[in-house]
Image (spheres, rainbow, N blue to C red):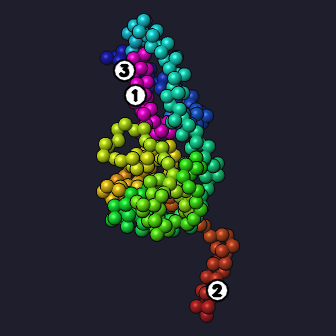
Amino acid sequence: MDTFFAAAGQLFVNIRNQIQMITISDIIDIAIIAYIAYRMLLLVRHSRGAQVAKAIVLLLAALVLSNAFRLNVVNFILSKTVELGLLALVVVFQPEIRRFLEQVGSSRLGDMFSKEEIPSEIEDAIGQTVAAYTALSRDKVGALMVFERKTPLDDIIKTGTVLDCSVSSELLKNLFWNKAPLHDGAVIVRNGRIVGAGCVLPLSGNTNLSKDLGMRHRAGIGMSENSDAVVAIVSEETGSISVAVNGMLKRHLAPETLERLMENELMPEQEPAKPSVLANLFKSKKGESDDGETNH
């Protein structure tokens, strides 16, 4: 028992000494690596790369166990496999790596220090979209709209017809009318304006999707997997409204829920503007003047 307490005490002393050696640089270093690992896990979680990632974890676990139990031949084979596998990972995870780099490249340094001002057209576009989707859902007319955020969608826009017009309920209903020439493709919205129609979207590579999802839903999910866009969908079969964000699909939405969700995604809450020093001074002077008049 004394030996146990001595060992526990020594372990506590070692842990304390290690903690005391940690510097601010170490904390920043660990935080950066943890954030990169977290972002990479988010990218592969809903893609074909998720299965490969699980296999890699099992392979590394087998490598550690083979070393612990001194299985020299197995350990040698696994270690060589891991060395060669590093090159294969670049090929296997090419879509995820590309998407990660696109997201990093599309983010601006200024966004880290200030809130981005949201164009007023976005609020109008949301209202017009909800009105159109309410009618399209009732009439069971299929629809697919992509709201661009930070990731540029110029390559997707080029697959359809380039437009430049404001979002209106009547225009959307005409575009998605089942006899319209552009009804099969997606409408792309940038900063509250329609910039493309009849566009072709990449299909999702997620093999775990429900089999009752059609091509329109799979294209919407695929677009949200390959960008940070918000994709709104109306099912032609059921009239159900859905929204895809970051590879996740939210189905059977009421128009009110659709509006609230789109506002949360496209119009993040803005911090109230702080009054200027001059305005505060003027207000203070005015208050003093009012008090003087009342007392008088």
Label 1 and label 3: CA atoms lie apart by 39 Å
| Residue 71 pos. (x, y %) | 39, 7
Residue 130 image offset from top left, x and y in percent: 42, 65
| Label number found at residue 5 | 3
**Amino acid type at image mark 1:** Lys
Secondary structure at badge 3 equals helix
Disc sitting over residue 185 in the figure: none
Q: Residue at the spot x=69%, y=73% of the render?
A: 278
The alpha-carbon separation of the residues under discs 2 and 3 comes to 75 Å
Residue range of the region highlighted in magenta in the rendering: 38-63
- Amino acid carrying mark 2 in the image: Ser
Tag 1 residue: 54
N-terminal label among 1 and 2: 1
The earlier-in-sequence mark between 2 and 3 is 3
Circle 1/circle 3 CB separation < 8 Å: no
Q: Is residue 16 left or right of residue 253?
A: right
Q: Where residue 52 sits: x, y (%)?
A: 43, 28
Q: Which residue is mark 2?
A: 289
Q: Is residue 218 above or below residue 237?
A: above
Task: Confirm whether the magenta stretch covers residue 253.
Answer: no
Quadrant of image for the N terminus:
top left
Q: Secondary structure at mark 2?
A: helix
Give yes or no for residue 42 being in the magenta stretch.
Answer: yes
Dot 2 crowding, Cα within 10 Å, few <14, some 14–19, many 20+ = few
Between 198 and 14, the one lying in front of the other is 198
Residue name at image x 64 percent, y 48 percent: 109
Three-letter amino acid code at disc 3? Phe
